[in-house]
Image (tube, grey):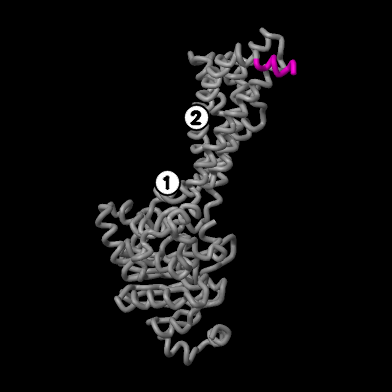
Amino acid sequence: MNAITSMMSIFQTHGLEFLKATVITVQLTAVSLLIAMAIGLVFAFFKVSNVFILEKLADIYVFLVRGMPLIVQLMFLYYGISSVFVLTDFTAGAIALGIHSGAYIAEIFRGAIQSIDRGQMEAARSLGMPYTLSMRRIILPQAFKRAIPALGNQFIIGLKDSSLVAYIAVTELFNRALSAQAENYMPFETYFVVGIYYLILVLIFTVIFNKIEGRLDTSKRSRRKGGKPFDQGKTVIQSV
Amino acid sequence: MIKVKQLSKAFNGLQVLKNISIEIDQSEVVVLIGASGSGKSTLLRCLNFLELKDSGEIEIKGQAIDVNRTNLNKVREDMGMVFQHFNLFPHMTVLANVIEAPVHIKKKRKQEAIDQAMGILQKVGLVDKAHDYPEQLSGGQKQRVAIARALAMEPAVMLFDEPTSALDPELVGEVLETMKGLAREGMTMVIVTHEMGFAREVADRVIMLADGKIIEEGHPTEFFTHPKEERTRRFLQQVL
């Protein structure tokens, strides 16, 4: 009972501040994921390019990012980036997070591109479409659709990982939690309240992603149009 | 129309085509037969450069094709290809499948491409399916869309790689009828198939491949009634 009243009072004193910090968390996540998507797409192309140097470059990038804890990379990049360029903490943090998520997103895109039936590329090429046009018009739209569930997962991880930039002085949600509990000496209650903020954020994220996934599902689309998918059991090769 | 001289092709040390030479005239319908692994599909795929030859010469419409100098995309525009597994673009409607290449490669105006596509769909009997997605179609309908998609580029030659092998028996007829229609119109066609009845009826020439070599060729009446080679006889006994 005591804990609950404490949480209520924390909510009363810090609620608005936490909400503002949540906005920063969302901004940070959005910017870093945009960076990550761009990086991920480029390195995914490198990986499927069949060009030795590009493939190796992508391998090294993924190896470095996956091989170190995010907090180490974050500190390393933060001090690295801000010793060369004059950047706000927010920008430095967003770039560092983007570079990190980018490696995972590259792998997601690579897997999705390679999962598209080889016949799709062959059909496009046989019509006279050049490689890049075939990629853009035929392979990527299908690969992207297939990557959505894994991307959604990665986005949620990215959202939660953004809490680590609290340590490089970006005043996002977790950073505010750190200061609040240092003021009120109620770490348990404070983190509990902040945890709920994160949960709500993730919930909203999930709902949005499920909407997108549903909208991109072709079988649902044809059902909406009133048609029936024809003997789906027999057309696995084509339509999976 | 097509001249092939001394064509050879190996995959990982396995010699799939050995010194193949053939000439195909304008409006000729050539059927390639042979056991699986005989190289007939590979030969077909070499004709539109989905597989690149190791040695030998390929001449198309009087132009010798040098893989490093000739724009293969331009060559492929002239060589429509129909695949065993249809390879329709599942994220596009039937109509969008058909106009994709004309709009993006031939730079046709969209309305013009649609008018032309509807004409072709009329010919293959699928006008009413123009706005459906491939997954809503039967196998036979899919293959007819694939034929329409290839025809939309107004190719000089149509290549068919086992176009009916993935179809349920009752759907084979409609695809063969469409192909017969093309043959009657004077389309130059190279067809890999196991449909011997079709070959007998439509082909101007039947070519038997075994172990990467042409072992016998001739007019279908002659070929099917008096095969000269022992291997051809054995093969025909097995499939007829």
Q: Earlier in the sequence, mark 2 or mark 1?
A: 2
Tag 2 near tag 1, CB within 8 Å: no
Q: Is residue B70 visible?
A: no
Q: Residue at x 31, y 53 (%)?
A: B103
Q: Residue at x 59, y 31 (%)?
A: A202
Task: Name the kind of residue labelled 2 in the image.
Answer: Ile
From the top left corner, tell me how far across and down residue B6 is, in percent: 45, 70
Above or below — where is B174 with respect to A208? Answer: below
Mark 2 residue element: helix
The residues colored magenta run A1-8
Residue found farthest to the top: A183
Task: Name the kind of residue labelled 1 in the image.
Answer: Arg
Other-residue count near label 1 (Cα within 10 Å), few / some / many at <14 / 14–19 / ≥20? few
Q: Which residue is label 1 attached to? A: A136
Q: Which residue is label 2 attached to? A: A35
Other-residue count near label 2 (Cα within 10 Å), few / some / many at <14 / 14–19 / ≥20? many
From the top left corner, tell me how far across and down residue A215 is, in percent: 48, 46
From the top left corner, tell me how far across and down residue A133 is, in percent: 39, 48
Q: Dividing the image into 4 quarters, which one contains the N terminus of chain B? A: bottom left
Q: CA distance from mark 2 to mark 1?
A: 20 Å
Is residue A176 part of the magenta span, yes or no? Answer: no
Q: Which secondary structure dominates the residues rendered in magenta?
A: helix
Q: Residue at x 33, y 57 (%)?
A: B99
Above or below — where is B201 with respect to A137? Answer: below
Q: Is residue A181 left or right of residue A57?
A: right
From the top left corner, tell me how far across and down residue A63 is, in percent: 63, 34
Is residue A6 part of the magenta span, yes or no? Answer: yes
Q: Point out which mark residue B131 bears.
A: none
Question: Which chain letter goes with mark 1?
Answer: A
Question: Which chain letter goes with mark 2?
Answer: A
Mark 1 residue element: helix
